[in-house]
Amino acid sequence: MVDIKLFLRNELEELVNVIHPFFELLQSQSEKHKNHLLPGYTHLQLAMPSSFGLWFGAYAESLVDDVLTIKAAYDVVNKNPLGSAAGYGSSFPINRTLTTQLLGFADLNYNVIYAQMGRGKAERIAAQSLVNIADTLAKLSMDACLYLNQNFDFISFPAELTTGSSIMPHKKNPDVFELIRSHCNRIKALPNEIMLMTTNLPSGYHRDLQLLKEHLFPAFKTLKNCIEMAGLMLSNIEIKENILTDEKYKYLFSVEEVNKLVNTGTPFRDAYKKIGLDIEAGAFKYDIEINHTHEGSIGNLCTSEIKKQMQTVMESFPFASVNKALDCLVQ
């Protein structure tokens, strides 16, 4: 049980250390492409102007919350169950506080029955923290697959990072993102699998718990590989410029035209109706210049504020003290 806690603690640390450079890449690409506009969609229908700055930045900020959940999982696994014996303690006068300090744990699982009950629970909570990262990567991968599609044609990648077809010479397939998406979707099933395998188990140890390792342990390596592959792809992404100059995207600017009327004193309801009637009559006129300045918008990405959030989360992990304790233990 303590070995599992030590393993999960180490794997979560390694995962965070892989996530952080990926986060920095997303932030860098967000700033680099902040002036490159692309369509935003709701219901997969044209909605409003977006930008690659917003797109990259959205996934960077998503990782902040994902790492927060890893921190929560880390806090759960960073408690020492050692000394609970078979789940009911020992008649020997052991010093559980000493072993907690020697192994670098933040605290004890004090109640010996609960220490045993942590089996299954710690694995499930750790798996759930993986799921949040996997979900972010899967969504990003789906976006990339759509954006590479010829009907979207927003991005491209070097030939060596895509694959062709067995019979169609024009194909440029996003296989890497498709595999990332599938691996991550499989990881998303892990917490439910663990939950079902531990359903209706009473307190105490049961051999069922042995099977939890089979899918959870390899998932860490799979997820780290997915992050690194996504980083490779996004480091080599090519962004198409001037996308929104195409007239087929003109209705993206309908809200901008409504807002212009509102700013001149027209009630929103009336402005909305006028622009709607103009669209129906084929008389809609628009300007592709936009000026969004509020926090988190196209013109104000708040990249530095998001970076500060990630720094705060990163600094909350006690990696240094844990590793120092382990180094002292093995010397």
Image (cartoon, rainbow, N blue to C red):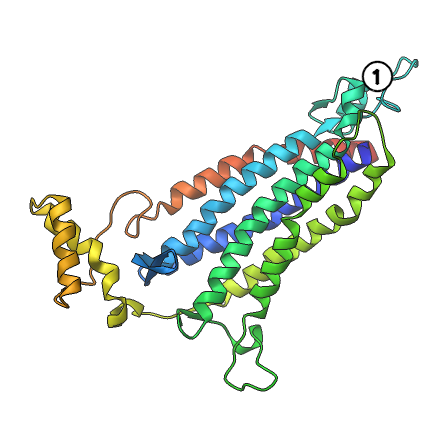
Residue farthest to the left?
Answer: 265
Task: Give the residue displayed 12% in from the left and 66% down from the top.
Answer: 283
Image quadrant in which you'd find residue 68: top right
Q: Is residue 124 left or right of residue 262?
A: right
- Is 84 on the left or on the right of 71, as rendered? right
At x 23%, y 66%, the residue is: 250
Q: Quadrant of residue 87?
A: top right
Q: Nearer the viewer, residue 234 or 193?
A: 193
> Does the rendering let one see residue 125?
yes
Q: Position of residue 179 (x, y in %)?
A: 62, 64
With respect to residue 9, does 24 lie above or below? Answer: below
Residue extending furthest right? 92
Pointer 1 local density, CA inside 10 Å: few below 14, some 14–19, many at least 20 = few
Does residue 220 sit above or below 232 in this rendering? above
Tally of numbered discs? 1
Q: Tell me where residue 8 appears, x and y as whole percent.
A: 72, 39
Could you tell me which quadrant the C terminus lies in?
top right
Task: Examine the rendering and report whether any part of residue 286 can be seen.
Answer: no
Circle 1 is placed at which residue position? 95
Tell me the quadrant of the picture where the N terminus can be found. top right
Q: Relative to 272, does residue 289 appear above or below in the rendering?
A: below
Q: In what element is the residue under mark 1?
A: loop
Three-letter amino acid code at disc 1?
Asn
| Residue found at x 48% / y 64% | 144
Q: Is residue 146 above or below residue 7?
A: below
Residue 38 percent across, percent down from the top left: 33, 63
Could you tell me residue 152's position as x and y percent?
Answer: 39, 70
Q: Is residue 171 left or right of residue 56?
A: right
In this rendered view, identify the residue nearer to me: 177 or 203. Answer: 203
